[in-house]
């Protein structure tokens, strides 16, 4: 059976840095950036993309819908 690997894309300029995605990630893939976006918010980004399993918890809980999850078979 094929193994699934995930990857996330965050729309940095729309992220408000609420950290809900970071807390909901079971593998610790997401972290908050030390820089701010053009609105002045610290934004989420995939700090450890190799850990992503494609569960999409982050996308489901994001109040602004700025996270897209992709799944690929490896």
Image (cartoon, grey):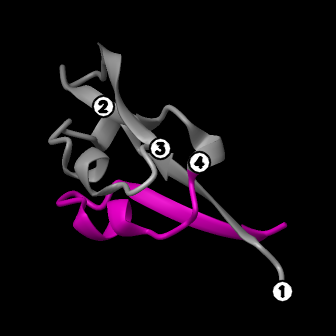
Between residues 70 and 28, which one lies in front from this camera angle? Answer: 28
Sequence-earlier tag: 2 or 3: 3
Residue 28, magenta (yes or no): no
Spatial CA span between label 4 and label 2: 19 Å
* Label of residue 51 in the image: 4
Q: Are marks 4 and 2 in contact (CB under 8 Å)?
A: no
Q: Are marks 1 and 3 in contact (CB under 8 Å)?
A: no
Q: Residues within 10 Å of mark 1 (few under 14, many from 20)?
A: few
* Label of residue 1 in the image: 1
Depicted 64 relative to depicted 4: above or below: above
Looking at the rendering, the stretch of residues picked out in magenta corresponds to: 52-74
Residue occupying the point 21% across, 57% down: 64
Residue occupying the point 56% across, 54% down: 52
Q: Residues within 10 Å of mark 4 (few under 14, many from 20)?
A: some
Q: Are marks 4 and 3 in contact (CB under 8 Å)?
A: yes
Q: Secondary structure at mark 3?
A: loop
Mark 1 vs mark 2, foreground winner is 1
Residue 21 lies, in percent from the top left, at: 28, 52
Q: Secondary structure at mark 1?
A: loop
Residue 2 lies, in percent from the top left, at: 83, 79
* Label of residue 43 in the image: 2
Q: Please name the residue that numbered disc 3 is placed on.
A: 29
């Amino acid at each position: 059976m094929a193994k699934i690997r995930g990857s996330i894309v965050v729309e940095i300029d729309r992220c408000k840095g609420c950290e809900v995605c970071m807390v909901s990630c079971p593998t610790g893939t997401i972290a908050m950036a030390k820089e701010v976006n053009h609105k002045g918010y610290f934004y989420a980004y995939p700090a450890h993309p190799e850990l992503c399993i494609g569960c999409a918890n982050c996308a489901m809980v994001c109040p602004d819908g700025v996270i897209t999850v992709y799944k690929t078979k490896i």
